[in-house]
Amino acid sequence: MTILYKVHDNLYVNLTNRCPCACTFCLRQTRDTMGESDSLWLEKEPTYGEIIADFANFDMKDYKELVFCGFGEPTERLDVLLAVAKYVKETYHMPIRINTNGLSDLIHGKKTAQLFRGLIDTVSISLNTPDPARYHELVRSKFGDISYQAMLDFARDCTRYVPHVVMTTVSTTLTKEEEEKCAKICEELGVTYRIRAWEG
């Protein structure tokens, strides 16, 4: 099963297939792979030891960044994520990013951003839309209507502990007016707004 895999110049970590959301646009509905990977559907969730062992199969000098992102929400396995991040920081001294739906606090029932201090360099959060009602329609979080505000609160908290906090939307999915509203939300939160290309 695929634990670590290459996308562009980065190495990605596929921690879990669990996710509290059922996004209407999720790529795993239409494909099994990303980048240079075999299927990202896991036979079982990899242990810390299995993840660490897989690094031996890659020349870490070839990669600019380690990214926690696979076919699931990486903060579902927060303890393992943090342990692997600590190992990578101490062993390879490379930048680390988490791609997340921003619902870590709801998943764990507590504030979690402070746990990233000194380990995570970038947190990239899917904003998707400036409209809370539309967000719920698109993301279909199991936590319901509280999810949108929780995601924004998590982003704000991350700015206190993580050097780079980014919120993203996908190009062609929003109007220019909606993108301007997203930019304003990001400005108010003190995070960077990025419109990313659609990967269909």
Image: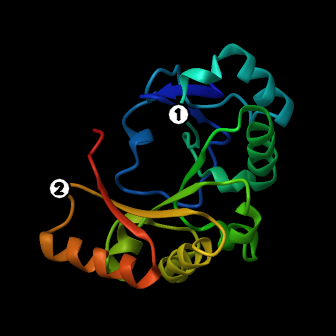
For label 2, the residue is: 172
Q: Amino acid at mark 1?
A: Lys
85 displayed left or right of 97: right
Residue situated in front as seen by the camera: 114 or 90: 90
Q: Residues within 10 Å of mark 2 (few under 14, many from 20)?
A: few
Residue furthest left as drawn: 176
Q: Is residue 40 above or below residue 182?
A: above
Residue situated in front as seen by the camera: 143 or 53: 53
For label 1, the residue is: 64
Residue 166 is drawn in which quadrant?
A: bottom left
Q: Residue at x 69, y 14 (%)?
A: 57
Residue 99 % position (x, y): 53, 52
Q: Residue at x 67, y 40 (%)?
A: 15
Residue 63 is drawn in which quadrant?
A: top right
51 displayed left or right of 38: right
47 displayed left or right of 153: right
Does the residue at mark 1 contact the one at mark 2 (Cβ under 8 Å)? no
Q: Amino acid at mark 2?
A: Thr
Q: Is residue 155 above or below residue 70?
A: below
Gap in Å between the C-alphas at discs 1 and 2? 28 Å
Q: Residue at x 73, y 70 (%)?
A: 114
- Secondary structure at badge 2 equals loop
Where, quadrant-wise, is the C terminus in this rendering? top left
